[in-house]
Amino acid sequence: MLKRLIDEDSLPHQLYLSMNAADESTFIEINKPFYRDSWRRWLESLQLLSQANCRRVIRVTFIRGKNTNQEFVPLFGKLIGLSGADFLEFKSYMHVGRSYTRLTAAEMLAMDEVLSLASRIAKSSGPFEYLDSSPVSLVCVYRNVDSRTDRWLVPQTQKAA
C-alpha cells in the first residue's frame, strides 16, 4: 500500500510507521504476523518510506524483556537508517486496551528508561537531536537534523496570526 501511495502521489502530510522489533525473530514473536514474508515486507516498507515525499516518522514501542536489551540498539539504528525518517518517536508499551490479554504492566518502562534507550538508539540511527518528551505518556521525540521538513506541522509564524 505504501508503494501505491507513493506511485499515485497520494501520501498524507505525515506518515507514521510503527516499529517494535529490531530483528526477524523478535518481529515474529511480538507481532505474530499472518504472512510468512512479513519481515521482508516490513524491510521493504522501511526502504519505501525513504522515498516518501511527506513528513516521515518512525514510532518505536519498547516492551520490557522483548525489545529493550542493549543488543537491539544497533539493530534498531540500522533499520531506522533505512527509513530516512524525519522524526523518531520512542514510547513505552502502555498496559491498556486489548494488550491486557497479552502483556502485563511490568512490561512498561519508566520514563528514565525510555529516555536512556531512545538516546542510545537515536545516536546509532544518524544525526538525530532530542526535541521533547511527555512523562505522562512515556514518550519522547527526536528530529533528524538533516531533515528537509520543519519541526512544526504549522509554521510558527502562522500560529501567531
Image (cartoon, helix red, strand yellow):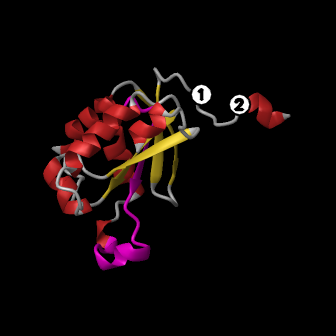
- Residue 16 vs 159, above or below: the answer is below
Q: Amino acid at mark 1?
A: Asp
Secondary-structure class at tag 1: loop
Observer able to see residue 130: no
Q: Which residue is mark 2?
A: 155
Observer able to see residue 118: yes
- In the rendered image, residue 161, in percent from the top left (x then y), is placed at 86, 34
Which residues are drawn in magenta? 83-105
Q: Amino acid at mark 2?
A: Pro
- In the rendered image, residue 122, in percent from the top left (x then y), is placed at 35, 35
- Tell me which residue sits at (31%, 30%) in the image: 81
- Quadrant housing residue 96: bottom left
Say whether residue 103 is magenta.
yes
- Tell me which residue sits at (30%, 71%) in the image: 106
- In the rendered image, residue 21, in percent from the top left (x then y), is placed at 25, 50
Secondary-structure class at tag 2: loop
- On the rendered structure, is 82 left or right of 25? right
- Tell me which residue sits at (39%, 46%) in the image: 115
User: Which numbered disc covers residue 13?
Assistant: none
> Which corner quadrant holds the N terminus?
top left
Q: Which residue is mark 1?
A: 150
- In the rendered image, residue 28, in percent from the top left (x then y), is placed at 18, 57
Q: Do labels 2 and 1 touch, CB within 8 Å?
A: yes
- Residue 107 vs 152, above or below: the answer is below
Say whether residue 48 is magenta.
no
Crowdedness near tag 2: few (<14), some (14–19) or many (≥20) residues, C-alpha within 10 Å: few
